Amino acid sequence: MRDDPALTFALTLKRWFRANGWPQKITDDWAKDAGIQSTTGPWASQVCNAMKAAGYNPKAEFFLALGEFNRFVAEQDVIRIKDTKLRSRLSETIPLLHENGQPYGAADFWSLYAGLLEPPAKFADANAELTQDDVDEWIRTLRNSFRQISLKQMCSRAEAWQMLSDAVTELNPDQTGWVQEVLAGLHDPSLDEATPHIYGYGETLLETMKRLADS
C-alpha cells in the first residue's frame, strides 16, 4: 500500500468510477433523483475533492453516504430511479466489494481512506505508479480533446481556449498557464512534473473538455 492512504483512496475511487463509466457527479445525480431524494449525498463536490487526494478531510457524513450509494449499486434497485438516463447509467454496474463479495459500507470506505484496509484486488492496480508513457498518453488525450473542441464548435484554438480557461482556473487557478502551454504544444512535461497534475485534476479536466466538445 502507498505511504499516502488518501491517495490510495482517491485512485481506488477513480478506478471504480472509470470501470463503471461514471462521471464524477453520478452520486450527486443519484442523491437528487426524485426516486431517492437523499439529503446527505454523496455530493459531486465531495467526490471531486476526495479524488484530488490532497488538502481534503472528508467528514463522517461523506463515508456514510458513499456506503449507502454503494449498497444501492450492489442491490441494483434501479427501478426506484425516475430519470431514465441515470437509471441506464446505474444498471448492471459493479459495487466496490470485499474479496468475500460483501459490498463496502461506510466503515470500509473510511478504513480504506485511513490506510487500515487494502483496496479490492480488482482495483489493486489503482496503486500502480505512473510511467512516462502514462503521462505522454494523458498529454495526447488532452491535446486531442482540445482539438475536438475547436472542430465541434467550429472555432479557432484561441476561441477554444477562451471557452476552456475559466474551467481550468476553477480546477486549479495556479496552473492555468501550465495547462495552456501543454495544450499549445509548447511544453512536454516530465513524469515528476505531470504526476501531481494528473492525480490532482487530470480526469476532471478531460471530462470538462469532453463536455465542451459535446455541447
Image: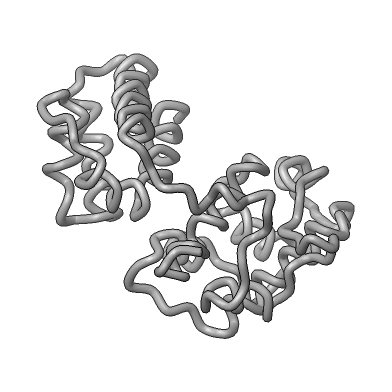
Which residue is pictured at 21% across the width and 29% down the height?
183
- Image-quadrant location for residue 103: bottom right
Q: What percent of the width, then of the height, locates residue 66?
A: 65, 69
Which residue is pictured at 38% across the width and 34% down the height?
134
Vertical order, 122 against 180 (above or below): below
Which residue is pictured at 51% across the width and 61% down the height?
44
Which residue is pictured at 37% across the width and 28% down the height?
137
Between 122 and 166, the one nearer to me in the picture: 122
Q: Is residue 156 left or right of residue 198?
A: left
- Image-quadrant location for residue 92: top right
- The structure's colour scheme is one colour
Count of all numbered marks drawn on residues in the image: 0
Q: Is residue 81 left or right of residue 9?
A: right
Q: Is residue 157 left or right of residue 22?
A: left
Between 89 and 10, the one nearer to me in the picture: 10
Q: What percent of the width, then of the height, locates residue 75?
A: 87, 60
Q: Quadrant of the C terminus?
A: top left
Vertical order, 181 against 193 (above or below): above
Vertical order, 76 against 202 (above or below): below
Q: What percent of the width, then of the height, locates residue 101?
A: 84, 60
Q: Is residue 19 left or right of residue 47?
A: right
Vertical order, 75 against 86 (above or below): below
